[in-house]
Image (tube, helix red, strand yellow):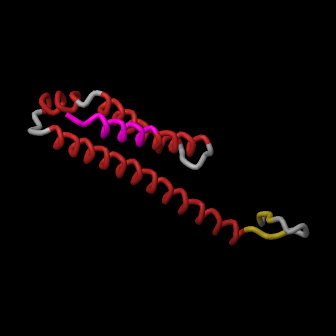
Amino acid sequence: MMDVKIQLIVGVGVILALIVIINMIRRKRLELRYALAWLLVGISIIVLDCFPQLITWLAVQVGVASPVNMLFFLGFCFSLMIIFVLTVAVSRMSIRIKELAQELALYERYGEKDENGCRENRK
C-alpha cells in the first residue's frame, strides 16, 4: 500500500497538471482532440491514487505478476497510443502541406497581377 503522504502529493500534482491542460485548451494553445488522452490519463491516475487496490485487482485479473508491472504495461500502451495519434496527425499535415505547396506553385506559374496588384488567371 502507498503511504497517505505520497498519495496526497501524487493527487495534488495530477490535479495541477489537469488544471494546466484545461487552461491550455481554453486559451487555444492545445487542441481538445490531442488533450483528451492526457485528460483521460490524469483522471485514471487520480482514481488509482484514491483506490490503489484497483491496480492490484487489475493485475490479478490480467495475470500480471506485480501491480508495478501492470503500471508499466499501461504506461507503455498509453505511449504507443500517443505515438500513433501523433503519427496520423503528422501524416495528415504533411499531405496538406504538399497540396498547398503545389497549389501555390500553380498560382505563381499561371497567375498574373492586374493593375491593383491582385492576381488573375490567364485565359
Residue 102 at what x, y percent from top left? Answer: 59, 65
- Asked if residue 43 is among those painted magenta in the image, a careful observer would answer no
Give the residues in magenta: 1-15
Q: Which of 55 and 52 is in front in this view?
A: 52
User: Which image quarter holds the N terminus?
Assistant: top left
Residue 106 at what x, y percent from top left? Answer: 65, 66
- Residue at image position (65%, 65%) is 104
- Asked if residue 4 is among those painted magenta in the image, a careful observer would answer yes
Residue 112 at what x, y percent from top left? Answer: 79, 70
| Side (left or right) of 30 relative to 107 | left
- Residue at image position (70%, 70%) is 108
User: Which image quarter holds the C terminus?
Assistant: bottom right
Q: Which of 31 and 68 is in front in this view?
A: 68
Q: In this view, does 61 lie above or below 27?
A: above
- Residue at image position (47%, 41%) is 16
Which residue appears farthest toward the front when viewing the image?
Answer: 5
| Side (left or right) of 64 relative to 44 | left
Residue 66 at what x, y percent from top left? Answer: 12, 39
Q: Which of 82 and 24 is in front in this view?
A: 24
| Side (left or right) of 63 relative to 76 | left
